[in-house]
Amino acid sequence: MPLPNGGLITENNRQYYEGAQSFTGDASGSSGQSFTTTFDTDLVFYSTVTTDPQYSLNNFKVYVSPTGVGGSFTEVTAYTVLNNTVTITGTIPTEAVVIIQLKRLDGGVYGNTASEKAYGNTTEDNYGSYGYIKLNDVINNFISFFDLFRFVVPR
């Protein structure tokens, strides 16, 4: 699989480690507000109906809070997705804080109940660059360095 941007990470700290991106809703609190994500991972969208088995195939969840204070976020399921742009079809509070959370092994911090948590492994799948090094990479690098050292430094 080719690395995007030649392996250069273009996400900020929150996007990379937390797998979340926040936005502020407009002052009118109207419906149809759109939020475009800039994750290195594309949003995968199947359904917004929580009882639909395909809902669990989405690789993200959307949360809204009127204040942005921890514990005040609720999951939103009235939205559409097109090209990494999430459009909330229902109304949201004026200047609400909107969070788009990629799924994580620990479920993230925004859902209030277990069913609202964003359980999955999308965020962890992003790891593998400087944050986490695979054992095979360590061994291969050691072997390469050892071979190079053997030929460059005479005994």
Image (cartoon, helix red, strand yellow):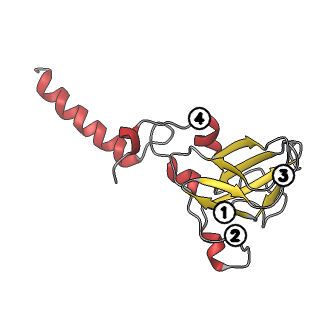
Q: CA distance from mark 1 to mark 2?
A: 8 Å
Give the label on residue 12, or none. 4
Disc 1 or 4, which lies upstream in sequence? 4
Task: Bin the neighbour count of mark 2 within 10 Å (Cα to Cα): few under 14, some 14-19, many 20 and up.
Answer: some
Element assignment for label 1: strand
Disc 3 and disc 4: Cα gap in Å?
A: 22 Å
Q: Which callout, 1 or 3, points at the residue further toward the start of the chain?
A: 3
Residue 28: x and y in percent read: 85, 45
Answer yes or no: do the residues labelled 1 and 2 have beta carbons within 8 Å? Answer: yes
Is 66 or 13 nearer to us in this picture?
Answer: 66
* Figure quadrant of residue 94: top right
Instruction: Answer above or below: position of 145 versus 60.
Output: above
Q: Residue at x 59, y 34 (%)?
A: 12
Q: Is residue 112 left or right of residue 136?
A: right
Task: Report how far apart the C-alphas of labels 2 and 4 lie in the structure.
Answer: 27 Å
Residue holding disc 1: 80
First reached walking from the N terminus: tag 2 or tag 4? 4
Residue at image x 13%, y 23%? 152
Kindly identify the amino acid type of the residue bearing the numbered disc 1.
Thr
Residue 116 seen anywhere in this rendered image of the structure: yes
Q: Give the residue pinned by disc 3.
A: 73
Residue 106 appears anywhere in the view: no
Q: Which residue is mark 2?
A: 48
Please tell me which residue lies in front, 124 or 86.
86
- Mark earlier in primary sequence (3, 4): 4
- Marks 3 and 2 sit apart, C-alpha to C-alpha, by 17 Å
Mark number, residue 72: none
Question: Does the CB distance between marks 2 and 4 fall below 8 Å?
Answer: no
Question: Residue 75: x and y, percent?
Answer: 79, 60
Mark toward the start of the polypeptide (3 vs 2): 2
